[in-house]
Amino acid sequence: MPPQNPHERAIVDVFKLRIALTYTVLRLLYALLATARSSLRLQRELALKNLALRQQLAILNRKTKRPKLNNADRAFWVALSRLWPDWQSALILVKPETVIGWHRKGFKLCWTWKSRIRGGRPPIDSQIRTLIRRMARENPTWGAPRIHGELLKLGFELGEATVSRYMPRRRNPPSQRWRAFLRNHTRDLVSIDFFVVPTATFRVLYVFLVLEHERRRIVHFNVAVAVASEDQSKNQTTRSAPQSFRTRVPS
């Protein structure tokens, strides 16, 4: 509801005017800041472009038949590519892919330097390594503990793991395969089987067979007949068959 009092209406109008003036001033300040930023950006890009062109001109003015870029030139272009987004527009002497390759190479060298070995165990003298190999070669039955003990007696202070690392690796003989095992022991191998043969007259024959592997020759066999009376059950006949076989087959 709008105010009815003229005095209140005047206060509201003054308040609205102040808000409009504040908004206008803020827009003007934003426009001025954007203009200044754009001007500074243009000046910065112009300065970087002039710097890039001057650097390439300096390379071409070198007193050589075919000017080559040194490490300082490569570092300059790598740094410029990180600071100026439009650096490719001022590059003339080499391709942009070449500068990217320089950056990757520098990144690799930096991390190689950071991951360098800064200490650790002292290196083993070459004479000690030669002595370890000689002792292992002249004494095939000696292991790392024995060689380590002999070196301690000679006054060399080093660990058993170090001795084991510098010992020559001996190739173990290949293990015998199953086919080779059968071929080497065929003369001494026999197969023994014990099986049941039912006959046409409903009798049961228990057969014991020994077969030689080398010539497939039957070394021994025997047959036992299970004799059962009429009052014996089938289970009793089956149980008495092995006993009958043991009485008929010689030990």
Image: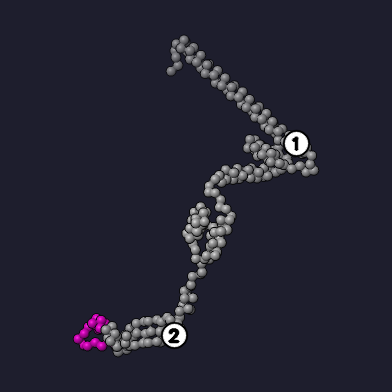
For label 2, the residue is 216
Q: Is residue 34 above or below residue 77?
A: above
Element marked by disc 1? helix
Q: For residue 243, say whether it is visible.
A: yes
Dot 2 surroundings within 10 Å: few (below 14), some, or many (20 or more)?
Answer: few
How far apart are labels 1 and 2 at the CA level? 96 Å
Tell me the kind of residue under disc 1. Answer: Ala
Please name the residue shown 37% across and 85% down the image. 209
Q: Is residue 231 magenta?
A: yes
Element marked by disc 2? loop
Q: Is residue 2 above or below residue 233?
A: above
Residue 181 pos. (x, y %): 47, 76
Q: Quadrant of the N terminus?
A: top left
Please name the residue shown 63% across and 43% down the image. 106
Q: Quadrant of residue 34?
A: top right
Q: Report the span colored magenta.
A: 225-240
Q: Quadrant of residue 100?
A: top right
In the image as oriented, which residue stretches furthest toward the front?
154
For label 1, the residue is 58
Q: Is residue 160 magenta?
A: no
In the image as oriented, which residue stretches furthest toward the top?
7
Residue 165 pos. (x, y %): 52, 57
